[in-house]
Image: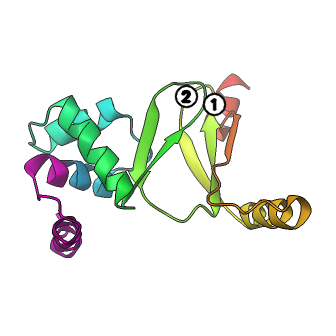
Amino acid sequence: MDTVADAALEQLLRTRGHRVTRPRRAVWEVLRTARGHLTVEQVALAADALGHDVDLASIYRSLDLLEELGLARSSRLGDSDASRWELAHPDEHFHLVCTSCGEVDHHVGSLVAQVRDHLDAGHGFDVDSVELTVTGRCTRCRDADA
């Protein structure tokens, strides 16, 4: 694990009046090393693979706290009811969700800023955050059906 990032997590937890616990460290490690967006069940499997024995209730609580602290971000992507988790990041991108394989990718560009500007200037709406999700088929799935 990255000791600098771990030390920052521990300092933030303590500064905000929270204990540094084994489940919180395990969930943080999973999110920092994850590739992609994980469901709670996937976080549990990844924690187990890293040698951490953490129950689902502790994972849910840890994810909620990390989100409250601004370190993690949940998104509802596609038709699934399950939230998917990742490290927190600015919302200047949108999610591309493949309806065939479920793969999620980020697309970075100026479109989110344009949406923010449009909503502010055109509708007087002060945007707090933007969560844009686009569903379709990824190149791999499209090519497989060709």
Name the residue at 11% across, 58% down. 19
Q: Main secondary structure of the magenta part?
A: helix
Q: Are marks 1 and 2 in contact (CB under 8 Å)?
A: yes
> Could you say which quadrant of the image residue 137 lies in?
top right
Q: Secondary structure at mark 2?
A: loop
Q: In the rendered view, would you say 18 is above or below 97?
A: below
Q: Which span of residues is magenta-colored?
A: 1-26
Name the residue at 31% across, 46% down. 63
Amino acid carrying mark 2 in the image: Cys
Queried whether the magenta region covers residue 8, the answer comes back as yes
Q: In the rendered view, would you say 51 is above or below 65?
A: above
Q: Which residue is the site of mark 1? A: 141
Q: Circle 2: is it few (<14), some (14-19), or many (20+) Cα within 10 Å?
A: few
> Could you say which quadrant of the image residue 45 lies in?
top left
Q: Which residue is the site of mark 2? A: 101
Image quadrant in which the N terminus is located: bottom left
Front one among 143 and 35 = 35
Q: Which numbered dot is residue 44?
A: none
Residue 58: x and y in percent read 18, 37
Image quadrant in which the C terminus is located: top right
Name the residue at 62% across, 58% down. 129
